[in-house]
Image (cartoon, helix red, strand yellow):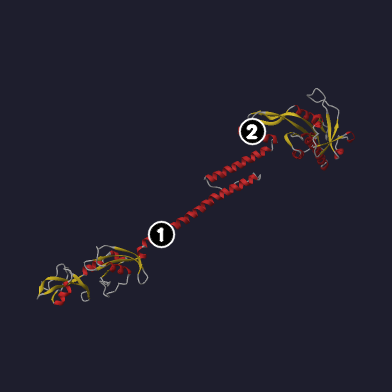
Amino acid sequence: MPADRLLPGTKQAVGVAEVSAAGGDAFAAGSASANIIAVDYEPKSDSWLATVVLPLATKFADSRAVLSARIDLQRIRGFIFNQPFRQTGAITVVDKNGIKLFDTEFKDLSKREIVQRALAMGDGGEAKVVSVQSYPRPDGTMMLGAFAPITAFGWTLMAEKKESDAYYAVDMMVKNLALWVAGGLAIAIAGAVLFSLRMSRPILAIGEAVSEVAKGNFAVRVKDVRSKDEIGALARRIDDMIVQINERFELTKFVSQGTISAIQRSGAQGVGLSGRRTEVAVLFADIRGYTAFAESREPEIVVATLNLYLQEQAELVTQHNGDIDKFVGDQIMAVFHGPGMASDALACANAIQRRMAELAGADPDRNLTVGIGVDLGEVVIGTIGARHRMDFTVLGDHVNLAARLCSAAKPGQTLASAAVVQKLSVPGEHQIVVRQLEPIRVKGKSAPIDISDIGSSPASSDQPGHQQEEAARIAAA
């Protein structure tokens, strides 16, 4: 073959046929295939040339002959350098000695970890891509890489990328995800805070209003709740409930404690028209001289005076374990229960007489006194009237007798029946003076009624209608 003929498929080739014993000996043990023995850079043409030798079977002058050719590697170099991967990474080709090819400085990369691993694999085995875990370059840069041997030429092709660049997308995704999570969490927290404030403030306002109602303040209202959601609806219902509770509380002032107790015992069925028998002491107290007093005073003064007297009497009834059943004009009706009912009723009557005397002494213009009647016995307590309008009261003959005794009592006098006096056997704290009087006849009774004039000791001697010299002292509760 002519030495200067171009090899097929090469851009440029320069060949020289050498026939020498040395040359023949040098390649006698080689493979029958071509071998690249050098890769050189040609500055003038800015090209890379590979020197390839091919053993020839034909002998020249009884010596082995080889064909030497130089092949332009520009196309291979261009293919490598034009890879898109090079925009973010590096593609490097090294020979079997670890020398970087296609580099005018002929860098020795044999000390790099990835190169050492590639060279250690040698030329044996099938060509395959081997990935390498992250490793540091001599300058400390962490890299990710892979290599594949080019067995035909004894080269190794390596692809490397900075670990930071390789994980850039992941890092950015993680960072963005972290930012989104942090932002979402911040928004969620802000929303939760706003929502909790929006929820908690009305609830706290409702709680404060309910606490005030529990203290008896029915003028309170839920403040600063204007929302139209469920909380706002609840606040408005609470306000309505407070108004209704206040109305019912005010209504309790118009009924007796017995009525309230009957309502509390009624349960879900409500109060029905019924009654029960029980033993009680009944007290009637009527203001004497009230009609004449009312004729000569202004209505406002009359009402104020009446309310003062009734208020004082009502408080004394409560202090002596009684219950105001009703007010009838200038008269009160009180009921006493329990084993000490007789002594409670008489002690209350004496307290009322003393208090009325004190009021009259404080203002002579109010020259008013009280007549009181007390009886004790079995009565019927229950509701009377209609289903839609009821009254809880005490009915019976002993109620009527107490009213008759009240009418028969003189100003400043307390009359009690024999049944009340007989019940004064229960020991107690009050000193009650009893003076038996002549029996009297009352409306509705065919026989005369045994009665007694009731006073107190020691101040009872100053009370009108009481005569100490005829009194018998009885200790009672």
The vertical placement of 353 against 176, above or below, is above
Q: Secondary structure at mark 1?
A: helix
Task: Tell which of 144 and 176 is nearer to you.
Answer: 144
**Residue positioned 37% across, 70% down in the render:** 140
Labelled disc at residue 266: 2
Q: Residues within 10 Å of mark 2 (few under 14, many from 20)?
A: few
Could you tell me how far apart the alpha carbons at marks 2 and 1 are, in whole angstroms? 69 Å
Q: Residues within 10 Å of mark 1 (few under 14, many from 20)?
A: few
Q: Residue furthest right?
A: 469
Q: Amino acid at mark 1?
A: Asn
Question: Is 93 on the left-hand or right-hand side of 175?
Answer: left
Task: Tell which of 14 and 389 is nearer to you.
Answer: 14
Quarter of the view holding residue 18: bottom left
Q: Amino acid at mark 2?
A: Ser
The x, y position of residue 474, in whole percent, is 84, 35
The vertical placement of 153 against 429, above or below, is below
The x, y position of residue 273, in whole percent, is 65, 28
Q: Is residue 22 visible?
A: yes
Task: Tell which of 366 and 461 is nearer to you.
Answer: 461
Labelled disc at residue 43: none
Q: Is residue 330 visible?
A: no
The x, y position of residue 172, in whole percent, is 39, 61
Q: Which residue is mark 1?
A: 176
